[in-house]
Image: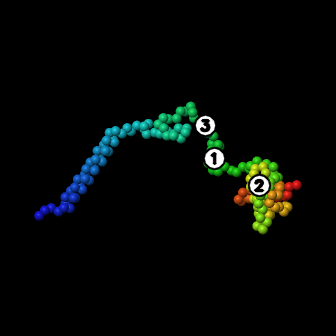
Amino acid sequence: MSKSQDTWNKKEAEKKKAKKKQDKEQRKEERKANASNNFEDMLAYVDEYGNITSTPPDPAKKIEIKEEDIQIAIPKHTASPIMDTVRKGIVTFFNESKGYGFIKDSDTQESIFVHVNGLVDAIKENNKVTFEIEMGPKGPNAVAVKLAK
């Protein structure tokens, strides 16, 4: 009787496994032989532009930074300089049935929302008006809106 085919395959698999193990050991020995365990070779530095380099930074170029100048969180909102509180503009759109519209500021050319609750005088489109700005939840709102004389 002849030997089973499985036995030959098992022997071949064991040979391949032994060969892989031997190759792995050989590569490990080569790495050990070629490795330089010098600590200086392992260091990397970052230059002033954020690039990684092998040369240490020049101590003469060192910049001192105060701890107070470092901002970790979002800076606190500082009040913007108050310009003229009464502004002038032209009503570009106003819907009387819904009670809102927009005024184009003549200085900044910015479109500012106006609600009927912020009106002193009744206004229509293309009227010249004076108003004050108040910050609302969605941006600047015009309040104390009066017809310009």
| Residue type at numbered disc 3 | Glu
- At mark 2, the secondary structure is strand
**Display coloring:** rainbow
- Residue at 49% x, 40% y is 52
- Please report contact status of discs 2 and 3: CB closer than 8 Å, yes or no: no
In the image, residue 102 above or below residue 28: below
**Which circle, 1 or 2, is nearer the viewer?**
2
Q: Which residue carries the number 2 mark? A: 104
Q: Which residue carries the number 1 mark? A: 71
Quadrant location of the N terminus in the rendered image: bottom left
User: Dividing the picture into quarters, in which one does residue 28 lie?
Assistant: top left
| Residue type at numbered disc 2 | Lys
- Residue at the left extreme of this rendering: 1
- Residue at the right extreme of this rendering: 149
CA separation, marks 2 and 3?
Answer: 48 Å
CA separation, marks 3 and 1?
Answer: 16 Å
